[in-house]
């Protein structure tokens, strides 16, 4: 009994020492009971946190995401792609279209890293960016106006209750009316970079489109190799209102919404029909995204994306959620 008590007291003291040592970044030598080895305290803390990892599940216009506060580097980088792929797998784990790590920034409120459900990274995701902004606000990292780092540049955001309005990076040059040979024959598409590559195909009867089949054909077409492209099928009422269905690269399926796809589709609509800002885009989820922009001839700037960013639930990932 006394021996067990001494062991418990020793373990508590060790844990306390390690937590204190980590704050000044020293190495801790541990020997005796567990054998002689050197452990960096941050690695030790990461191992502990990876057993029970807090997360938020959020949705933006039907795109759902797992968000993790990674400011303390609790996620293991060595097996990151496998971790993401497994926790994003529906029915086997939490399931999501993507995963977002929110991290420290030296210049703005925070930095994000965005990953598709297959574990691949992406420079931008409009729906995910709105969720990240609201997540940071709810976690007291930032106020109602904030800025954060992405691979596509600095994104500014304004929290509007359950909605978020983002100032997006300026888009690339629009390529219009290119033809593409597919198994279904020739089709016309438009192409533009809105943080990630997007093809836009204008159609009349959007509900009849086999998005997964035709979207996959275009996404993997040699014209877009090696990166590939996201594919948006769009119909218009001619009054600045669009319907959109999107095949997303990295998810490799139709999703219920895509923010950067909505921006790409709005820009194409403005060029084709002279539609003025703002343009409302109704997604597969029936959520509406509003796109604001300035236009001088065919040059677009001051792009804003507004839409919902809903907190679905908070939870804790156990190791069994990804270690299978």
Image (cartoon, grey):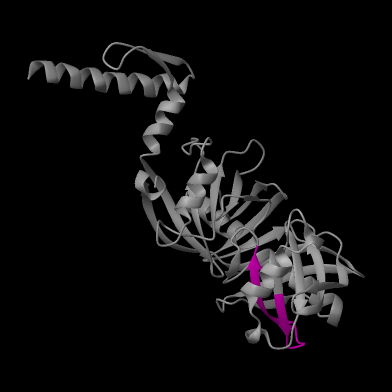
* Residue shown at 86% from the left, 75% from the top: 271
Q: Magenta residues, as a range?
A: 233-248
Closer-to-camera residue (285/105): 285
Identify whether 146 is placed above or below 283.
above
Query: Residue 229 lies in magenta, yes or no?
Result: no
Residue at the front extreme of this rendering: 183
Would residue 233 be seen by someone viewing this image from the given angle?
yes
Expressed as whole percent of the image width and height from the top left, the position of residue 301 reads 82, 62
Considering the image in quadrants, where does the N terminus appear?
Answer: top left
Would residue 289 be seen by someone viewing this image from the given angle?
no
Question: Which quarter of the figure has residue 187?
Answer: bottom right
Identify whether 172 is placed above or below 38.
below
Identify whether 86 is placed above or below 291.
above
Residue at the right extreme of this rendering: 297
Query: Residue 245 lies in magenta, yes or no?
Result: yes
* Residue shown at 51% from the left, 51% from the top: 85
Closer-to-camera residue (278/266): 266
Side of 73 where 154 appears, left or right: right
* Residue shown at 43% from the left, 50% from the top: 55
Side of 149 where 117 appears, left or right: left
* Residue shown at 31% from the left, 23% from the top: 15
Question: Which quarter of the figure has residue 211?
Answer: bottom right
Closer-to-camera residue (240/7): 7
Predominant secondary structure, magenta span: strand
Expressed as whole percent of the image width and height from the top left, the position of residue 62 reads 54, 70
């Amino acid at each position: 009994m006394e021996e067990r008590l001494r062991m418990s007291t020793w373990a508590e003291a060790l844990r306390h020492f390690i937590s204190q040592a980590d704050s000044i970044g020293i190495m801790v030598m541990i020997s005796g009971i567990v054998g002689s080895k050197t452990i960096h305290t941050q690695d030790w803390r990461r191992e502990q946190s990876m057993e029970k990892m807090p997360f938020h599940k959020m949705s933006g216009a039907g795109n759902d995401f797992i968000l993790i506060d990674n400011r303390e580097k609790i996620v293991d980088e060595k097996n990151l792609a496998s971790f993401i792929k497994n926790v994003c797998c529906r029915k086997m784990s939490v399931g999501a279209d993507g995963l977002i790590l929110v991290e420290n920034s030296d210049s703005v409120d925070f930095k994000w890293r965005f990953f598709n459900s297959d574990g691949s990274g992406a420079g931008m995701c409009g729906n995910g960016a709105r969720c990240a902004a609201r997540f940071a606000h709810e976690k007291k990292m930032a106020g109602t106006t904030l800025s954060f780092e992405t691979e596509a540049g600095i994104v500014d955001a304004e929290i509007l209750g359950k909605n978020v309005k983002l100032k997006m990076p300026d888009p690339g040059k629009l390529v219009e009316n290119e033809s593409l040979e597919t198994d279904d024959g020739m089709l016309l598409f438009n192409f533009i970079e809105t943080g990630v590559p997007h093809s836009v195909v204008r159609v009349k009867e959007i509900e009849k489109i086999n998005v997964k089949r035709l979207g996959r054909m275009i996404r993997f077409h040699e014209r877009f190799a090696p990166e590939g492209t996201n594919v948006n099928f769009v119909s218009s009422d001619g009054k600045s209102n669009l319907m959109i269905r999107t095949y997303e690269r990295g998810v490799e399926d139709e999703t219920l919404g895509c923010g950067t796809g909505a921006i790409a589709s709005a820009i194409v609509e403005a060029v084709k029909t002279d539609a003025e800002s703002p343009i409302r885009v109704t997604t597969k989820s029936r959520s509406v995204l509003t796109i604001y922009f300035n236009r001088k001839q065919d040059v677009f700037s001051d792009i804003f994306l507004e839409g919902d960013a809903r907190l679905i639930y908070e939870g804790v990932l156990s190791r069994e959620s990804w270690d299978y």
